[in-house]
Image (cartoon, rainbow, N blue to C red):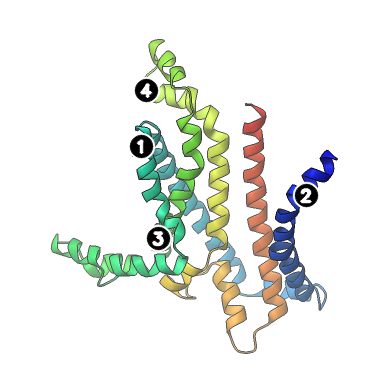
């Protein structure tokens, strides 16, 4: 009876997973393997595949690392505030999660583009607006724009952990002669490193597979895998089996990153 009740409760989630993940992936896989393994060979033979893979890995590591560091610092600050103020600031910080990648990109163009508001203000301060406006349309600018919606994910993920952390442990370490930095590094950090790593993997998977912000900012000139996939399905006479194969590779990479994050999260739960 209990097993049937659990299955009944899980049925809606299983249905959503089947309709919106399993069936689309099966359809893409059927297209990719329809002609044998040749579609994967054509993907690996593309002259832009390996540079795009390197670009995706670089963008993912840089954007995820910076976003994680900033997000943890923001969450640490919020955890020390009063509950009412923390709730208000958390709501404001979470707002970027409601925007699509294209909206974020256009917002950054209006703010930091060649004629953007912030760019013009910096120009009045004596900085070169041409250099500042051009920087947004580079991989560095893309990492900067991506952090806008990655940082809130980190904050929302680690804030509950930091709010419930027993600060008496830090006070005890400081009373024994440790500095505040030593107390954080030797007492708090070992206890939160697994959830932080899980949050890192989450946003790494997001930025690895995202293409909307990149497409709006740099077009198809940037060598990353999602834009390589976009090129395969948008050009006349596109090789759709190869596009399906590349889509499976991106899905597998994001799934592996997410699985790594879940492994870190399960390690933390086992030690509770």
Residue occupied by mark 4: 180
For this view, does 184 lie left or right of residue 206? left
Give the CA separation, mark 3 to mark 2.
42 Å
* Residue topped by disc 3: 145
In percent of width and height, residue 260 lies at 65, 45
Residue plotted at (74% across, 59% down): 15
Quadrant location of the C terminus? Answer: top right
Q: Quadrant of residue 117?
A: bottom left
Please say if the residues under marks 4 and 3 sit with CB atoms less than 8 Å apart. Answer: no
Looking at the picture, does residue 271 appear above or below residue 160?
above
Going from N to C along the chain, the mark reached first, 2 or 1, is 2
Q: CA distance from mark 2 to mark 4?
A: 50 Å
Q: Which residue is mark 2?
A: 8
Residue 213: tell me if it is visible.
no
Secondary element under disc 3, as helix, strand or loop, is: helix
Q: Residue at x 56, y 41 (%)?
A: 197
Compared to residue 186, the image places residue 95 above or below, namely: below
Q: Nearer the viewer, mark 1 or mark 3?
A: 1
């Amino acid at each position: 009876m209990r097993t049937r009740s659990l299955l009944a409760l899980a049925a809606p989630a299983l249905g959503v997973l089947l309709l919106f993940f399993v069936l689309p992936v099966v359809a893409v896989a059927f297209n990719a393997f329809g002609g044998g393994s040749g579609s994967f060979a054509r993907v690996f033979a593309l002259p832009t595949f390996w540079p795009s893979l390197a670009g995706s890995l670089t963008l993912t590591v840089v954007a995820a690392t910076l976003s994680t560091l900033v997000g943890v610092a923001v969450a640490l600050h919020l955890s020390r505030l009063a509950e009412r103020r923390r709730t208000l600031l958390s709501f404001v910080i979470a707002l970027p999660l409601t925007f699509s990648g294209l909206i974020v990109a256009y917002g950054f163009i209006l703010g930091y583009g060649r004629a953007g508001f912030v760019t013009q203000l910096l120009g009045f301060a004596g900085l070169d607006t041409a250099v500042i406006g051009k920087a947004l349309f580079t991989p560095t600018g893309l990492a900067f724009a991506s952090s806008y919606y990655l940082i809130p994910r980190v904050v929302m993920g680690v804030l509950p952990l930091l709010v419930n952390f027993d600060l008496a442990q830090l006070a005890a370490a400081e009373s024994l002669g440790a500095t505040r930095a030593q107390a954080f590094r030797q007492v708090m950090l070992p206890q939160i490193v697994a959830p932080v790593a899980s949050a890192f993997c989450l946003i790494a998977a997001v930025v690895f597979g995202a293409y909307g912000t990149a497409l709006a900012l740099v077009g198809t000139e940037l060598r990353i895998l999602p834009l390589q996939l976009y090129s395969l399905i948008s050009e006349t006479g596109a090789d759709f089996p190869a596009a399906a194969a590349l889509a499976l590779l991106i899905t597998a990479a994001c799934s592996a990153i997410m699985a790594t994050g879940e492994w870190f999260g399960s390690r933390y739960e086992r030690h509770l």
